[in-house]
Structures are given as C-alpha cells and as structure tokens.
Image (tube, helix red, strand yellow):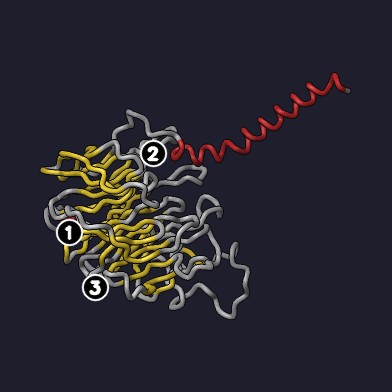
C-alpha cells in the first residue's frame, strides 16, 4: 500500500489544483481589474467630444478626496496611507507637494468652512477634526465617530444650511446594525454639537453633494453583495431629511430583499412613504462614488444642470462593470433625461484596469478634477 501512497497523493493534489482552477477562475476574473497593478503605460482614456484630459498630478498612492482652498491649492487624503497633503497649484500646473499630516486613521473626507476659508475639517474613521491651515494652530477634535467594520470612509460636506454633514457606512455587507450611527447621514453644527440623524437606510453612501438649483442633497449608494451579477442595483438618491432609504431590507425601486429579510409583514415593508425608492438605478456592482453637478458658467449649454458620477468599478462580478465617468442629463428642475459615458478607457479589453476614478470636482469654465486611487493620480479635464 505504501508504494501507492505517492501516486494517490499526487493524483489528489492534481484534483485539488484542478478544482481550485475551475472554481477559482471566475473569482479571479471578477477581481482581476482590482488586483492587477495599473502599469506604466495604460491605454489612453476616451472623453466626450469637446474636452481633453491629462494627468495633473501623479505618485499619489491611494488618493481619495480633494478640497480646493481659496488660493487654488488642492488638499487631498490618501486613506490607506494615513496621510493628508496639499498640492500648490497655479495656472493648472502643480508647483509643489507637501505632506501635512501622517499616521492618521483612514483619513477620507475634507471640507473647508464656507464662512471661514482657512478652516479645514477632515474625517478619519473614528473622528472629525478641524484646523486652521497655513498657521501653527493645533488640530482640534470636533466629534467621535464609530470605528471598525466593513466601511471605514467618512465623507464630509457643508450644506446650504451651513451645517456640517457626514456619511457613515454600514459595519457589514447586510445586517441589522447594533450601533445606531451606522448606515446613515448625520448633520451637526460646526463645533460638533447638535449631532442628529438626517437620513437612514443608506448602506454605503460614500459621496454626496447638493444641487445648486434647488439645494437638495444627492448621494450615491452601493448595494449589497452576493445576490449575483445583476442585483441589487447601485443607486443615485435624492436625500430628504428624515428619509429611510431601505437598507438592509429594501433596495432599488423599493424591492424587498427576501434573501436577507425572512420576516412576515402585515404590509409590504418596502413602500412609500415608509421607505424611499432610488431616484436612478445603476448597474449592480458599478460602485458609484464621487458625484458633482456641472455649473453653467463656461460650460456648453447642453451640460447645464447635468451630473457627473464616478463608477469606481466592480470587484465581485463575473463580467467587470464600471470604471468610468457617466454624465446624467438633467433639466433645470432635476428631471432625469438620460445618460451617456463622459470618460471611459480605464477598463481594458483583457479585463485589467489602468485606474479607478473616485472623486469629481467640477469648476466653471469646463474644468474638472478627478482622483484615481488605483493609478494614484489626479486628472484634469478642460473644455477645448
């Protein structure tokens, strides 16, 4: 029997390797755009007619969020590196880069106080702080936030009401949260007081902004995983104060997630006005992140009121999707008129990816800045 041991062991190993290859190959194909490095010579990006795109700044590993100060300099967070830095910029060119803070806990959101342009707020996973830039003032903690869990990014923004808003993602893929601060957007006064819930049922609304026409908050939202390639849709939502956007038991156009929620109800748990449906559904696993409204000044009239959204790209879909910037056509009243690709080319024909767009910063004159946390760059788009 001993003489057959190595033969049997070898055959068993071959069977195991074959099984790993057979069953693991679809998973590898799904994560391939994420795990394969960007490379030095990515294919050129394709942008809508009338615009050009170039790399504005590079060697910014893991860059996520930008905030431009009153001097035109760009502050940015590198979440995985634990750093916040600033780029000195003049006339569309970078003059210098300075590391400002390091050893931070997953820094992400950045926001300048509209009433005090030298007051910068920044969010780490477990807290929000503020500091007077271009000074020796110490960093001041504003408020503590829940730490740990699946989603660690905290995004900040000042609303039209001059309050500070923060988005806090869920601690899990899909679950009933133990911490009442998870999967919600909160608002507060600038000193962190009057911290209160603004909207709930938002699994991971990483980015939000306000429509400059009517002042309404819009947010992107990532749906849960493991319901297949096409479910649930990712979402664009118009966020109403006190609104419940359904997670963990509803998704998309108020569809009940019966895979997770096995409870029996006297009424459908996913109907208005109890739960608010998505405004626009996005293909599942596109991973929508940054969104920005296009200003009127210096832009073609056909772009007025439109919305640009960054699709960070899938990691868990058999055929990768996303990896692009999409233009959502809206009229002056916010009515959805359709969509088209604005920038593509990050996803290659062999299902590798040269980059993953994150945040979008639109400016008058047809200028757009976009961060890319895979390629480690900021792109600059200009109108031709």
Q: Are marks 2 and 1 in contact (CB under 8 Å)?
A: no
Q: Secondary structure at mark 1?
A: strand
- Considering only order in the chain, which callout, 1 or 2, is on the residue closer to the N terminus? 1
Name the residue: 59% across, 67% down: 261
Q: Nearer the viewer, mark 2 or mark 3?
A: 3
Q: Give the residue number, with chain letter if any, for mark 2.
A: 347
Marks 1/3: CA–CA distance = 19 Å
The residue nearer to you, when weighing 343 against 13, is 13
Q: Earlier in the sequence, mark 1 or mark 3?
A: 1
Residue depicted at x 32% and y 45%:
63
Query: Which residue reaches farthest top?
Result: 3
Is residue 327 left or right of 278 when viewed as pictured? left
Could you tell whether 241 is left or right of 151 in the image?
Answer: left
Residue at the spot of label 1: 118
Q: Position of residue 147 (x, y in %)?
A: 45, 59
Point 33% across, 31% down: residue: 42
Which of marks 3 and 2 precedes in the sequence? 3
Residue at disc 2, secondary structure: loop
- The residue that mark 3 highlights is 161
């Amino acid at each position: 029997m001993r003489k057959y041991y190595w033969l049997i062991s070898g055959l068993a190993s071959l069977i195991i390797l074959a099984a790993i290859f057979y069953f693991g190959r679809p998973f590898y194909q799904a994560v391939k755009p994420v795990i394969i490095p960007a490379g030095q010579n990515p294919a050129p990006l394709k942008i809508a007619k009338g615009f050009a795109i170039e790399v504005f700044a590079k060697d910014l590993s893991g860059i996520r969020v930008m905030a431009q100060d009153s001097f035109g300099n760009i502050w940015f967070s590198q979440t995985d590196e634990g750093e916040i830095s600033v780029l000195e910029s003049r006339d569309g060119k970078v003059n210098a880069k300075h590391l400002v803070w390091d050893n931070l806990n997953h820094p992400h959101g950045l926001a300048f106080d509209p009433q005090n342009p030298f007051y910068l707020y920044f969010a780490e996973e477990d807290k929000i702080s503020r500091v007077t830039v271009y000074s020796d003032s110490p960093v001041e903690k504003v408020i503590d936030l829940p730490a740990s869990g699946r989603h660690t990014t905290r995004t900040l923004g000042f609303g039209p009401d001059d309050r500070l808003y923060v988005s806090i993602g869920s601690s899990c893929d899909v679950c009933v949260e133990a911490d009442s601060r998870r999967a919600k957007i909160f608002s507060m006064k600038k000193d962190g007081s009057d911290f209160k819930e603004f909207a709930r049922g938002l699994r991971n609304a990483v980015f939000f902004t306000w429509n400059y026409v009517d002042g309404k908050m819009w947010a992107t939202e990532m749906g849960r995983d493991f319901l297949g390639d096409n479910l649930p849709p990712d979402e664009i939502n118009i966020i109403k104060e006190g609104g419940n956007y359904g997670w963990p038991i509803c998704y998309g156009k108020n569809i009940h997630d019966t895979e997770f929620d096995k409870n029996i109800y006297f009424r459908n748990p996913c109907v208005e006005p109890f739960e608010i449906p998505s405004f626009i559904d996005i293909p599942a696993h596109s991973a929508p992140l940054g969104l920005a409204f296009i200003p009127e000044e210096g832009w073609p009239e056909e772009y007025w009121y439109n919305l640009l959204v960054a699709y960070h790209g899938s990691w868990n879909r058999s055929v990768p999707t996303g990896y692009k910037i999409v233009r959502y056509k809206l009229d002056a009243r916010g009515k959805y008129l359709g969509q088209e690709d604005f920038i593509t080319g990050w996803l290659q024909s062999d299902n590798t990816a040269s980059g993953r767009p994150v945040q979008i910063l639109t400016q008058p004159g047809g200028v757009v800045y976009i961060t890319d946390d895979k390629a480690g760059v900021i792109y600059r788009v200009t109108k031709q």
